[in-house]
Image (cartoon, grey):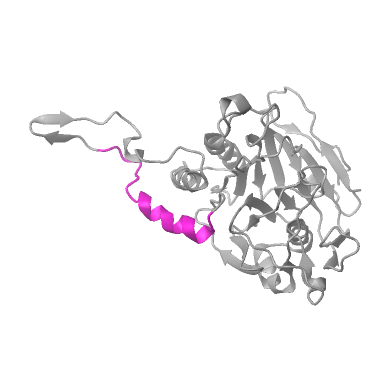
Amino acid sequence: MPVLACTGITLCSQDGGIVVGRTVEWALSNAHLNDILVVPRNKKFRGLPQESLQCKEWTGKYGFITMTAYGQDFGPDGLNENGLYVGVYYLPNYTDYAEYSVEDAKKSLSLGGLMQWVLSSFKNVDEVMENLDDIKVVQFDSKEYGGAPMPFHMKIADDSGNSKIIEIVNNGEIKVYDPFLGVITNAPTYDWHITNLSNYLNLSTSPNQAKTLDNFKIQNFGGGSGLIGLPGDYTSPSRFVKAVALTATCRPLKTSTDAVFESFRILDNFNIPIGVHVPAEKIPENMESVTQITSSSDLKNRIYYFHTMGNRNIRKIELNKIDFATVKESLIKDNFGNNQEIIDVTPINKK
């Protein structure tokens, strides 16, 4: 199976803005990730889709939008009306959810249930952290979700700049990390990526200085020579290091909108074109394991931006224009065309 290779970053602006961006690559054909679900307040949720199983149940306090996949009511990321963001990233071979048990049934939810619980129940990251003991994330492989197993870790962030990485390991143990510069990719676990950064302490934005050896002067080739050795392949460790380097060297950004556009520019460096993960004779007809969608969430202004491989124009959904108390649950189908500007795709009732 091709590798899923999502990359996430966070940028801050001088006006107090927090922008969380990410790419989404999915290995099992086109998941229709550009369909965005609008979820109202006061919706009743079940943590597991099987009606025959007892599980955690709750009524949502807050409305949110979420990217979807395969027609399911959750997907790679989402943003709620308070500016709380949730995104999940593939973590194969390391995620280890708990086994379902009747004793803990009323605490049990799946990965998708976890996303919905966070987005519908909390205003900020601190509230999520205070309530993690109330849940148990259990193994559930969704046939509808492309038939794939669901080993993911999660990044949450709010408009204060607070952010956490949540990983489920060791039969349901919840581990929490502070994200380094807001960067996240895939396997291995997050602590490994932090340790691996020690291998790249030599990287610098300053150009390498000329050297004279045995009366022969060796010159650098110009700008960027200090970053020689920055990895450029598509593996998760390499993308993590590169995302850290590009985030750390980001220019000062005056406004949230500046940060949104800069997030798209940075994430362009992680676009995966069709064909790089498969032999030439097996290039898929659909967009398998390529960058199908890139999103950027302005947490301060509650705006969700995105573009797709098929349409590079940036579209936006302004959550402040949605009355989550009265809106009906609805799907925003992204079928917009070739306007050379940011396009508002919020075709639902407004305040």
Residue pictured at 59% horizontal, 57% vertical:
161
Residue pictured at 90% horizontal, 61% vertical:
51
Q: Image height check: is 34 above or below 162?
A: above
Magenta range: 188-208
Q: Image height check: is 3 above or below 271?
A: below
Residue furthest to the left in view is: 215
Image spot of residue 107 (x, y percent)? 78, 71
Taking 92 as reference, is 144 left or right? right
Q: Image height check: is 105 above or below 342?
A: below
The answer, for residue 322, to whether it is visible in the render is: no
The answer, for residue 57, to whether it is visible in the render is: yes
Q: Which corner quadrant of the image does residue 309 belong to?
A: top right
Taking 188 as reference, is 229 left or right? left
Quadrant into which the N terminus falls: top right
- Find out whether residue 180 is within the magenta segment: no
Taking 72 as reference, is 18 left or right? left
Residue furthest to the front in view is: 281
- Find out whether residue 197 is within the magenta segment: yes
Residue pictured at 57% horizontal, 49% vertical:
15
Image spot of residue 240 (x, y percent)? 49, 48
Q: Which corner quadrant of the image does residue 134 belong to?
A: bottom right
Q: Nearer the viewer, residue 230 or 38?
A: 230
Q: Nearer the viewer, residue 62 or 59?
A: 59
Image spot of residue 17 (x, y percent)? 60, 49
Q: Nearer the viewer, residue 196 or 145?
A: 145
The count of marks equals 0
Image spot of residue 73 (x, y percent)? 82, 49
Q: Which corner quadrant of the image does residue 168 belong to?
A: bottom right
